């Protein structure tokens, strides 16, 4: 199965758009199918019990295999348009050659032989509709014109080759009606295949549109993801800054608490001491009316100056802290 897949996908490249890839795959499939059919036909002709008039010779078999397998080889070289042209023209030309060669070896040709050739040509006339897309319209029109002319001038071509129905065919009343049926069949097959091709093309365009919309949505999602990543980085940066700010504020609060404890200690010991002594001196004046006021005032002045020194020291300390905070904020 792996070998079969290699043959079917032979010539496919990543750079091909999907319609071109599909044309290559279908061409390889048809090449293998036609090769299998002529091998089967050649094998059936060899069975004596069937008593079938032999149409394919060994040379015809190899010619057919060469014609039908060559497109697979051409696809390997990325010549996809040439491959499809070869397959369409080659398959039609092969059946013309085999039947005309067979007719030339007969003195009288049955009407069924002419009918069989028409049927094979009808079958091959559907191949171009399967292989060519809208991007290959010129080549498609050339092949369609050839197949149509082969049906329209079927008798003229055979007469020119000397094997026409009027020259070698067995007279039959239904021969002309078969010609009409073949033309009608070609129109039905061609028209149906053309409509089928249009439906495929419309579906392809709808798929391309959907893929375009999906790509646009994907780009929008990718853009939103990028914005979310930027926002995430910004939030991370903000969180880091907040953490630094919180840590700094925590350190400041700890320092402030230390300063408060310091000032509380100063207030409890350095300020409260002189104040307590002043209060004691005032109580002495209430208890002793014969106070030596010069000495008393000297002692009061001493305590007041001590309080003043402490307050000045506190003031200087607060100024230094204030200046330090101002420089840190700058």
Image (tube, rainbow, N blue to C red):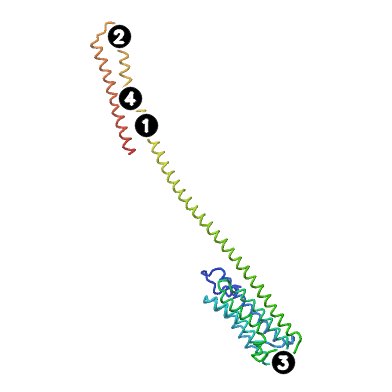
- Is label 2 in contact with label 1 (beta carbons under 8 Å)? no
Q: Earlier in the sequence, mark 3 or mark 2?
A: 3
Marks 4 and 1 sit apart, C-alpha to C-alpha, by 15 Å
Task: Tell me residue 286's x, y (percent).
Answer: 32, 8
Marks 2 and 1 sit apart, C-alpha to C-alpha, by 41 Å
Q: Residues within 10 Å of mark 1 (few under 14, many from 20)?
A: few
Question: In the rendering, which numbered label is found on residue 266?
Answer: 4
- Is label 2 in contact with label 4 (beta carbons under 8 Å)? no
- Camera-nearest label, 4 or 1: 1
- Disc 3 is placed on an element classified as loop
Q: Which residue is mark 3?
A: 108
The front one of 238 and 246 is 238
Task: Tell me residue 140's x, y (percent).
Answer: 58, 76
Tell me which corner region of the image, top left, top right, bottom left or bottom right, holds residue 149: bottom right
Image position of 133 (left or right of 260): right
- Is label 3 in contact with label 4 (beta carbons under 8 Å)? no
Task: Tell me residue 22's x, y (percent).
Answer: 58, 71
At a point 29% along the width and 32% down the height, the residue shown is: 320
- Camera-nearest label, 3 or 4: 3
The front one of 63 and 105 is 105
Q: How many marks?
A: 4
At a point 62% along the width and 84% down the height, the residue shown is: 94
Q: Which residue is mark 1?
A: 256
Q: Earlier in the sequence, mark 2 or mark 4?
A: 4
Q: Which residue is mark 2?
A: 285
């Amino acid at each position: 199965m792996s070998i079969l897949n290699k043959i079917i996908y032979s010539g496919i490249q990543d750079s091909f758009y999907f319609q071109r890839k599909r044309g290559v795959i279908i061409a390889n499939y048809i090449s293998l199918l036609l090769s299998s059919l002529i091998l089967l036909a050649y094998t059936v002709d060899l069975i004596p019990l069937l008593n079938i008039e032999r149409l394919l010779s060994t040379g015809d078999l190899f010619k057919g295999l060469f014609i039908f397998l060559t497109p697979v080889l051409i696809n390997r070289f990325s010549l996809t348009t040439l491959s499809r042209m070869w397959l369409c023209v080659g398959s039609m030309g092969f059946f013309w050659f085999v039947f005309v060669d067979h007719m030339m070896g007969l003195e009288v040709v049955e009407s069924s032989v002419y009918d069989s050739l028409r049927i094979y040509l009808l079958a091959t006339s559907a191949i171009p509709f399967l292989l060519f897309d809208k991007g290959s319209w010129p080549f498609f029109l050339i092949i369609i014109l050839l197949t149509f002319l082969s049906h329209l001038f079927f008798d003229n071509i055979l007469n020119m080759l000397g094997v026409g129905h009027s020259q070698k065919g067995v007279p039959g009343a239904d021969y002309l009606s078969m010609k009409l049926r073949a033309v009608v069949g070609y129109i039905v097959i061609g028209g149906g295949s053309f409509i089928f091709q249009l439906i495929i093309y419309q579906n392809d365009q709808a798929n391309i549109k959907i893929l375009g919309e999906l790509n646009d949505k994907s780009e929008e999602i990718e853009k939103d993801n990028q914005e979310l990543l930027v926002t995430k980085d910004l939030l991370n940066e903000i969180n880091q800054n907040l953490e630094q700010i919180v840590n700094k504020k925590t350190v400041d609060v700890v320092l402030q608490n230390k300063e408060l404890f310091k000032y509380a200690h100063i207030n409890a010991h350095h300020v409260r001491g002189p104040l307590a002594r002043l209060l004691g001196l005032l109580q002495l004046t209430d208890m002793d009316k014969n106070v030596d006021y010069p000495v008393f005032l000297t002692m009061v002045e001493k305590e007041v100056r001590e309080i003043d020194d402490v307050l000045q020291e506190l003031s200087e300390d607060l100024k230094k802290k204030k200046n330090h905070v101002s420089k840190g904020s700058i």
